Image: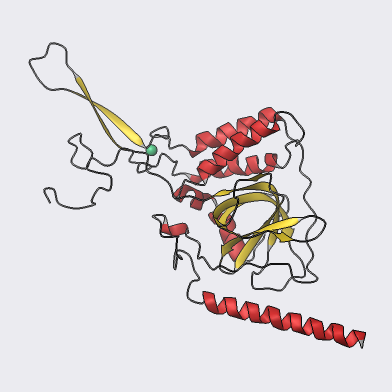
Amino acid sequence: MVVHSTIHRCACAVLLLGAIAGRSHGCRASGDGKGGGAGPGAGTATGKGAVPSAPDFPISLPIGAVVPDPVTLLPGRPDVFVGRVTALARALQCPNCAGTGAKVTRHRDRAPARVVPTMRETRADCVDCHGTGFSVNPSRVSPVLDSLVLLLGGVDPDAPSTTKLLDKARTVLERLGTSGDLVEKVTATTRNCVTSDRIPCRGTACSVTGEVGAPIPIGGGVRLIPVKVSAHSMVFLRAPIINAVPSGGAVLAGGVIAGPIEKIEWQWGQTMILDGGYLVPLIPPEHKGPGIDADKDGVIDGPSPPVNVPRGK
Ligand SMILES: [Zn+2]
């Protein structure tokens, strides 16, 4: 009798899960794919990396799922850590404008009567970064970011300098989270792996953008923070060292790969766990440059300059 009721309960659970899976699949049928249906609140200029916002997240792991053991990370020296943070900050900057988003040009004033020629400065959006101040070259950023992520897990939580170190790292990672195109390029490889169920080696660092959900308790006081990478793929963060995201929304997240969750059959495909790492908000980039001076008269055309509009209109 006891056995029978257990089986009965299992069957119910399976039915319930099936119903949930079916329902959410139905909801998403039209919103899958990159750059496609960005949901309400996602209407930003960056379009490209927009994550389809389906509200549903798992509330627990399926029964029998086996979570990989945490990765052991080697302790790093604080000075090495600071060096890496500085290197990342530098790598994020557009080299053409030193991160200012503006290019200043000095002209000699052509008035002939003056004894001392006067100089005039004109400022325009940097042509490389289009006024954002961010580098357009992800290959400068990715290796530095990965090595910083590996060092993050090795920070000694009891050392007196740790709070300051992590503050510095958080500031730089948050800046990366506002870099728009750059952050999408830097995270593209991982996103492709995750969405096609290819999980990189245990012990490697990775970063990805997505939408964060409520933490899932898995016993032993451990909680997994879900980050939905696409409508049908997800990663989990286990005990991120830096967590600057209090609630939901678009995030940039990274960590060291512990491996996939084993014995799991669900709508999210192969799901990997990242240890250590970080979680920061993903915010559309702000325009830092002065704007565009298309007619080169030294006057900025306006905050949202018209493109290819004939002059005088
Ligand atoms: Zn620039």
Residue 84: % across, % down: 61, 34
Q: In which quarter of the image is residue 258?
A: bottom right
* Quarter, ligand 1: top left
- Residue 90 place in picture, x, y as percent: 51, 34
Q: Residue at x 43, y 47 (%)?
A: 285
Q: Is residue 206 among the parts visible in the rendering?
A: no
Q: Quick one: 24 or 117, which is closer to the camera?
A: 24
Q: Which of 171 and 269 is in front in this view?
A: 171
Give the residue drawn at x 12%, y 22%: 110
Q: In this view, does 12 lie to the left or right of 99?
A: right
| Residue located at (70% from left, 81% from top) | 16
Answer left or right for 249 relative to 121: right
Residue lying at 77% horizontally and 84% vertically, measured from the top left: 11
Vertical position of residue 53 compared to residue 150: above or below: below
Quarter occupied by residue 149: top right
- How far across and how far down the image is residue 68, in percent? 78, 58
Q: Residue 151 placed where, x, y %?
A: 69, 39
State which quadrant residue 136 falls in.
top left
| Residue 111 appearing in the image | yes
- The quadrant of the rendering that contains the N terminus is bottom right
Task: Give the colour scheme of this rendering.
Answer: secondary structure
Q: Looking at this rendering, what residue extends furthest in the top direction?
A: 115
